[in-house]
Structure formats: structure tokens, C-alpha cells
Amino acid sequence: MTEAVGYLASVLTAASFMMTNVWRLRWLSVFGCVAFLVYGSAVGAWPVVVVNAFIAVINLYFLRKLSSKKHPFSLLHTQADAPILRLFLERYGQDAASFFPNFALEAMHPERARFVLILHELKPIGLFIFEREGCGNARIHLDYVSPDYRNLASARFLFDDSYRVFIEDGIRELEVRDTTPAHAGYCRRMGFVPSLLDPKVFVKTLAAAGDMARTDSSTLRLARQFAFVSSRAPTSR
């Protein structure tokens, strides 16, 4: 049993060095250190215990900094023929196709399509392309982030912190079609729900804070009116 814990610790430590995502690297390293602590304590290898305890503390310190740090994300609106967009797709187009196999930049409508680069400390890490379809709806054609930054932080920045980029463009509902199984799971985590008309289509309803407040107050007024009418209506007993 003790030997198995030692092998597990080695596997976790080795796996952490294979991670390109810093968040996952740190967590795997922490788990590896904990396993080494158990192993070292069991066999009396105290230098192993001391070193791994120190490494675990360092990892936890940087994980705390990563979680508490305000993510330095920003958005850059661009055009389909912009060199930076073309270069980004040349670099990550093959990986993006694994999530959006039907995406074609040339098929985007020149007037209705919007092209948004997601930046991390001014470095392009993601590309979001959507197309207005009228009546406040927009279809997402590409929602991609490079592997090194694929920890949902940039997605939360886009959908939670910067949702007004859609509101100001008159969009109240986002739609994703032809999702792959992996992207369907991502959509659910981002608040998208399957359409009642087609379960393969995922939709997300947006509302500005003012809209939400007006909706809540209207709902409350309707509820009060219904309660008043109900109290005045004759009963069957």
C-alpha cells in the first residue's frame, strides 16, 4: 500500500509538468506533494516530507494569488480581414475546428457578423465571432480560447462581466448550434440551456441590470394584482 502511494505521488508530479494550464499544473503539484507527504511519513523519509511540504505551501500561495487576482482581460473589436485575426486563426484554426467543425470565416456576413478578440494582458488568447439574426437574437459561430488559458476565466469575463457588449448591440439572446459534446458541456457551465424546440441548440438569455429591475417590478405588480383579484373572486364552497 505504501509503495502504491509513492507511485501515485510520482505520477501526479510527472503529470503536473505536462500541463500547459498554470492553474491545473499547480493543483496537480499540490496533490502530488500531499501523496509524497503520506509516503514519506510512512517510510520515515523526513527529507522528502520537508521538501514536499515546502513545495505544497508555495503552490497554495500562488493558487491563492491566482484566485484573488483580478483577471486582466479586455476585448478588442476587429474585422474579418484584420491581420491579427488571420494570424490567430492560422495559429489555432485546427484546434478551434475540433470544437466548431462547421466554422468558416468566409461564410460570415460582412455586416451582421461581429469579431471580438479576447486579450489577456494585451495578448490575444481567444476569438469570439457571432452574427446578428434579428429580433434581438445572435448566433455564435466561434467561441474559442487557446489551450493555455482554457480555465473558464476568460469565458466568465465575456459572458458575466462584459455582457453589455451584446446588450449595446441590441442582442438579448445568444444561440449556439451544431455543438460538439465537449462544447455542449462548456455551454451548460456558462448558463446556456437546450432549446425547447431543438435540444441540440443551446440558448442564453441576456438582460441588462435595468431590464432585470423592470422585469422584477412588473412581475411583482402582476403578482399583487392576481392576489387581489383572487381574494375578491367568489369561491365554489
Image (spheres, rainbow, N blue to C red):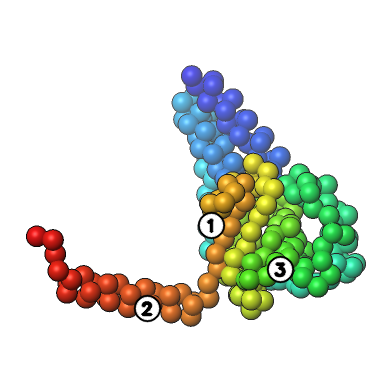
Specify the amino acid type for callout 1: Gly
In the picture, the disc for residue 217 is 2
Q: Quick check: can you spot residue 100?
A: yes
Q: Do the residues labelled 1 and 3 touch (CB within 8 Å)?
A: no
Q: Residues within 10 Å of mark 1 (few under 14, many from 20)?
A: few
Of the residues under marks 1 and 2, which one precedes in the sequence?
1
Residue shown at 46% from the left, 74% from the top: 212
Specify the amino acid type for callout 3: Arg
In the picture, the disc for residue 132 is 3
State the image quarter where residue 126 is shown.
bottom right
Q: In the shown orientation, is residue 127 left or right of residue 24?
A: right
Of the residues under marks 1 and 3, which one precedes in the sequence?
3
Q: Tag 3's secondary structure?
A: strand
How far from the left and from the top, in percent, is residue 148?
Answer: 72, 52
Residue that mark 1 sits on: 191
Of the residues under marks 3 and 2, which one precedes in the sequence?
3
Q: Tag 2's secondary structure?
A: helix
Label 1 vs label 2: CA separation? 24 Å
In what quadrant of the picture does the C terminus appear? bottom left
Q: Residue 215 versus residue 89: which sits nearer the camera?
A: 215
